[in-house]
Image (spheres, rainbow, N blue to C red):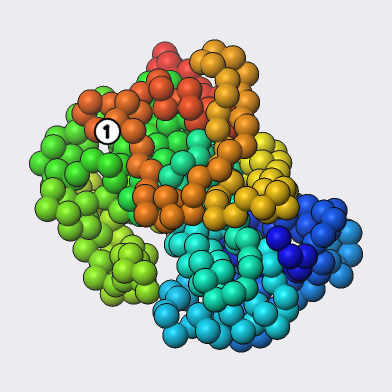
Amino acid sequence: MAKGNVLIGQSGGPTSVINSSLAGVVDGAIRTKGIGRVFGMRYGIEGVLNDFLVDLASESPDVLKGLRSTPGSALGSSRLKLKEEHFPAILKQLKKYDVRYYFMIGGNDTMDTIHRVTKYANENGHEMIGVGVPKTVDNDLFGTDHTPGYPSAARYMALSVLQAGILSRDMQKVDQFVIFQSVGRSAGWLPAATVLGRTSELSAPHILLLPERHFNRDTFLQTVAAAHKKHGFVSIVCGEGITNADGTPVSVSQTKDKFGNVEFGAMGGTSAAMMLHRMIADEFGWRGEFQVTESLPMCAADRGTKLDFDEAFACGKQAVKLAARGEGGVMVTMNRTNKPGTPYAIEFGTISLSEVANHERPMPDNFITKDGYGVTKAFLDYAAPLVGPMPSYSSLVAKRAKP
């Protein structure tokens, strides 16, 4: 492998810890012999096409250290879908800056971008190694136990529904139901995590709607009625990508992004939470509310977990180690090594970029209850070490006073 420079980019939606992964790559690259300059692409692959690279090694140690706890995407992001006509211009830039090591932090589409760019470069005489660093709050990347960003976003969701559930319980004579919508196009990892905030069988959430199970209006309304009778109010958490039996989104959005994915929060469509609100209000005549978080779980560093920040940084450093050994065309993975009932532990592995790009990872069936409206102990055992302990709140002992 020829000596050369490093190029790093971030792509897709952010997470609370994506900049920690960036700091890990930069730290690893600076410390590795044989690696020259360390460039960051401004606004993803568009930074390469527009000749907008930044010298990351020139940043102060305090700035790089601060990235480890900074939300957002420090380099900026992009959702540009690469076309064949882009590749000659990209290769010209890679040669201009003598880029031999290419890292991107992102999800499925990002891994596809790394695969295509490095393949084109190598086929056209420019030797280059590409390694992917996993990232997504959706937790749907194939081949890894979980993704950096998921633990913090899951904690955000669990805390939000826990606290909103207390409010809903206390306001049940005003609002009889509340719907909390989570991001996650085709996987229910985030809405499922809200169950970690339950303090008893009676506390929120009462009903989960996961993209892994088709939505049935009649069954849903029957379940809502039963939950209301039992609890006095209903707390519902839904994934943004829930679909009807025929595959149409409950959100009925017709807007799609450049990769052909439905934009559930986009103008021109309605949210799943809004549609569910209408169903319940029309059926029962109840007053209720819905909450759509959109990007909030992706940037709430104050609710981030130490585990998540540390693992994100370590994934970045591991990517550099792989590249330095000549292992390209792969994404860093985290594999859980502890046995059930023993302390959480992981080790690093790899999976080919093409496998990641062509697969998604929904929740397995053994994580979802038979009725489809809840999660099993197996899921709780999986998610609890990632999210961490939940706070405990007091409740009044509501005994009727005697005169």
Q: Say which quadrant the C terminus sits in.
A: top left
Image location (x, y in percent) of residue 171: 40, 40
For the point 43% across and 31% down, the residue is: 195
Q: Nearer the viewer, residue 144 or 79?
A: 144
For the point 36% across and 37% down, the residue is: 363
Residue 170, located in which quarter of the rendered image?
top left
Residue 347, located in which quarter of the rendered image?
top right
Q: Nearer the viewer, residue 269 or 229?
A: 269
For the point 22% across and 51% down, the residue is: 243
For the point 55% across and 28% down, the residue is: 336
Give the structural element (helix, strand or loop) at label 1: loop
Q: Nearer the viewer, residue 347 or 321?
A: 321
Q: Nearer the viewer, residue 213 or 334?
A: 334
Image location (x, y in percent) of residue 377: 40, 20
Counting every numbered tag in the picture gives 1
Please name the residue that numbered disc 1 is placed on. Answer: 373
Image location (x, y in percent) of residue 348: 62, 37
With respect to residue 207, does 342 lie above or below?
A: above
Q: Say which quadrant the N terminus sits in.
A: bottom right
* Residue 266 visible in rendering: no
Horizontal placement of 59 versus 44: left or right?
right
Image location (x, y in percent) of residue 39: 74, 71
With respect to residue 190, does 59 lie above or below?
A: below
Horizontal placement of 379 versus 277: left or right?
right
Residue 37, located in which quarter of the rendered image?
bottom right
> What's under tag 1, amino acid-wise?
Tyr
* Residue 314 visible in rendering: yes
Mark 1 is surrounded, within 10 Å at the Cα level, by few (under 14), some (14 to 19) or many (20 or more) other residues, namely some
